Amino acid sequence: MRHIASGIRIHLGVQVTSIESDGARVTGVSLSDGRHIPADLVVVGVGVLPNVELAAEAGLPVASGIIVNEYLLTADENISAIGDCALYASPRFGGSLRLESVQNATDHARCVAARLTGKSELYDGLPWFWSDQGPDKLQMVGLTTGYDRVVVRGDREQGLFGLLLQIRAARRHRVGQPRRRPHVGAACLPRMVQSRRSRRPILASI
């Protein structure tokens, strides 16, 4: 409803079939259900693919990114890969991750810089993301996969709320590993509740 109130319309279950023009400028977009949406500006956001060709040509293992270990090293210990193209081993989440965010890239750079200056530590950063949508800023901490329940803090009707995506401790326990308290996979906050007081109960749970 907040998107609609801001004049935003989201069309689900359809594809763009063509972008129309009058020969000089864009005039609209045609959809797969037959509708035509007039427009004088079209922004195309279709995602990205990691550039792994150079690494592959160098004989380095690649998959959905350039494969690196928890120190962001490739199979060649003299070569590191960081940022959006790096598929790194995550001790925190117990698998391989490739993330596309400013935080991920800058934290990778700090990790490699520390290693090159004699302070080698494994990379175990906590992912966080943000998105400005109309008057709101959505913020997310952690990953939004594998959770058991959603805890709502605040007032959804007023748009002043956060979501905690929780994994029960029993699911996270493995033989030979210490039991952990329930883990919060992600927290989402709109712009209006970003005061220190309102953030503390959510972020302290992570």
Image: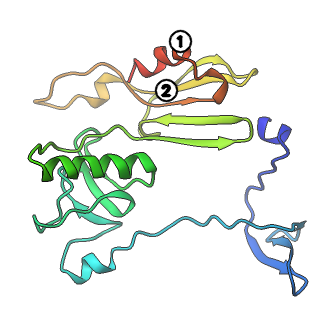
What residue sits 23% from the left and 47% below the top? 111
Estimate the x, y position of residue 113 in percent, counting from the top left. Answer: 21, 51
Residue 101 rendering spot, x and y as whole percentages = 45, 51
| Crowd band around label 1 with a 10 angstrom C-alpha radius: few (<14), some (14–19), many (20+) | few
Q: Secondary structure at mark 2?
A: strand
Rendered position, 18 above or below 121:
below
State the residue in front, 56 or 163. Answer: 56
At horizontal 27% and vertical 47% (from top left) the residue drawn is 110
Location of residue 168 in the rendering, given as x and y in whole percent from the top left corner:
36, 24
Q: Based on the displayed image, in which of its 4 quarters is residue 166 positioned?
A: top left
Q: Quadrant of residue 63?
A: bottom left
Indicate whether 41 appears above or below 173.
below
The disc label shown at residue 32, or none = none
The kind of residue on which mark 2 rests is Arg
Q: Which residue is mark 2?
A: 149
Disc 2: CA contacts within 10 A as few (<14), some (14-19) or many (>=20): few
Residue 197 numbered mark, or none:
1
The quarter of the image holding the C terminus is top left
- The residue shown at (38%, 73%) is 51
Q: Nearer the viewer, residue 41 or 34?
A: 41
Q: In the figure, is residue 132 to the left or right of 63?
A: right
Percent x, y of residue 2: 78, 35
Work out whether mark 2 precedes mark 1 in sequence or the reverse, and give the earlier one: 2
Question: In the drawing, does residue 81 fall left or right of residue 9?
Answer: left
* Towards the viewer: 188 or 185: 188
